[in-house]
Image (cartoon, rainbow, N blue to C red):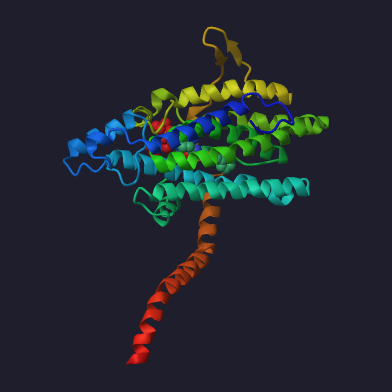
Amino acid sequence: MYGNDFEQPGAATLLDEVEAAEQALRAAAERRVAAARAGGTGDTGGAEAELQEYFDAVVAADQKIEPRDWMPEAYRKTLVRQIAQHAHSEIIGMQPEGNWISRAPSLKRKAILLAKVQDEAGHGLYLYAAAETLGIDREELVGLLLTGRQKYSSIFNYPTLTWADVGAIGWLVDGAAIVNQVPLCRCSYGPYARAMIRICKEESFHQRQGYEILYTLAHGTPEQKAMAQDAVDRWWYPSLAMFGPPDTASTHSEQSMAWKIKRFSNDDLRQRFVDMCVPQAEVLGLSIPDPDLRWNDERGAYDYTQPDYDELFRVIRGDGPCNRQRMAHRRRADADGAWVREAAAAYAAKRSARPAEAAARPAEAAA
Ligand code: FAQ
């Protein structure tokens, strides 16, 4: 349980789930199910059918697949696609809020926002590191992003027009991100699951800081409240779209769920997000811009209007309000940072050459 300066219904439950997932991860590390049959290491040393059988048994038993384990090539590719897309999202996702660092309304708000944006860079690093365990390196992944062959989340192609947008991103975008990511803490691939535990703990603070910004604005002057409402009106449907296409149009869900990479479908998570946001909006005193939003007793959930999926696909294809700007900025940042990477690589090479130089010296002296 964390923070109690104001009520935020549903927020603590998500962190409890992260806690439970972390304990499950520890327990999984202590046992190796199917190990008895496979000789304890997952190394059957045998035919593909036997390896597949071991992989299936580990997944079925809710154990973790680790980098040393055999895995089907399609499983590896799916993970690289999802983890890389996720990492790119964290890095591109620094831009919309970064836009407000120099214009935050107070020193305290500026320091908090700066720390938050830095956290996103950290999340990108954890995720690139998790992807690298699958045999692909970060430079290659970044290259795939910069040449448009890998994606990043649609949500970061929308502009941040006012300070209240920073609040709406925290509440809704980080809120949607953690609803989507808490189940990933139980993903079958160990390095991704472990990265997600750390990310979700930080992300829950991000959501809280956005919620607190909106709470302050919503309880301020009428102009501030109107600014907060306008931001929520603009970010609501793009946040719903973050969960991806509806289940009927989701190409990867079925297989990813069978492999226990994804634990819930896009629509199930979207519903969970809506059900969490409604009571939180009531506490904020802001309304959700959906005239058809109402409780459905039979389903035990809110009925709501779906986002415009044609718009989602347009944004994914590169035709959103800020796609070009986001990619141009990232390409520029990559080019500007090239000398730092080169200097770091030269320094590392020099350091690793040093012991050899030292070892060579006495021999040289003797000669
Ligand atoms: N945007 O078959 P599905 C954050 C693509 S992090 C762009 O349903 P899947 C933190 C999808 O890739 C936000 N593309 O796919 C933060 C696929 O295309 P492909 C990122 C999308 O993978 C906060 C096609 O549509 N989070 O916000 C989107 O089973 C504030 C078919 O879709 C993650 O990446 C979309 N919204 O499910 C940072 C979480 N939706 O590759 C800074 C991990 C779908 O076949 C500031 N990822 N597509 O060409 C996931 O959970 C999944 O990958 C989904 C999509 C749920 C996003």
Q: Residue furthest left?
A: 47
Residue at the image position 51 percent from the left and 48 percent from the top: 124
Q: Is residue 246 left or right of residue 39?
A: right
Q: Is residue 233 above or below residue 124?
A: above
Camera-nearest residue between 328 and 257: 257
* Residue 277 coordinates in the image, percent (x, y): 62, 24
Residue at the image position 61 percent from the left and 16 percent from the top: 293
Q: Can the viewer see residue 328 in this picture?
A: yes
Residue at the image position 45 percent from the left and 32 percent from the top: 24
Q: Residue furthest bottom?
A: 367
Residue 93: which quarter of the image?
top right
Total labels drawn:
0
Camera-nearest residue between 233 and 74: 74
Q: Is residue 102 left or right of residue 197?
A: right
Residue at the image position 18 percent from the left and 39 percent from the top: 48
Camera-nearest residue between 295 and 20: 20
* Residue 33 coordinates in the image, percent (x, y): 31, 33
* Residue 268 coordinates in the image, percent (x, y): 48, 22
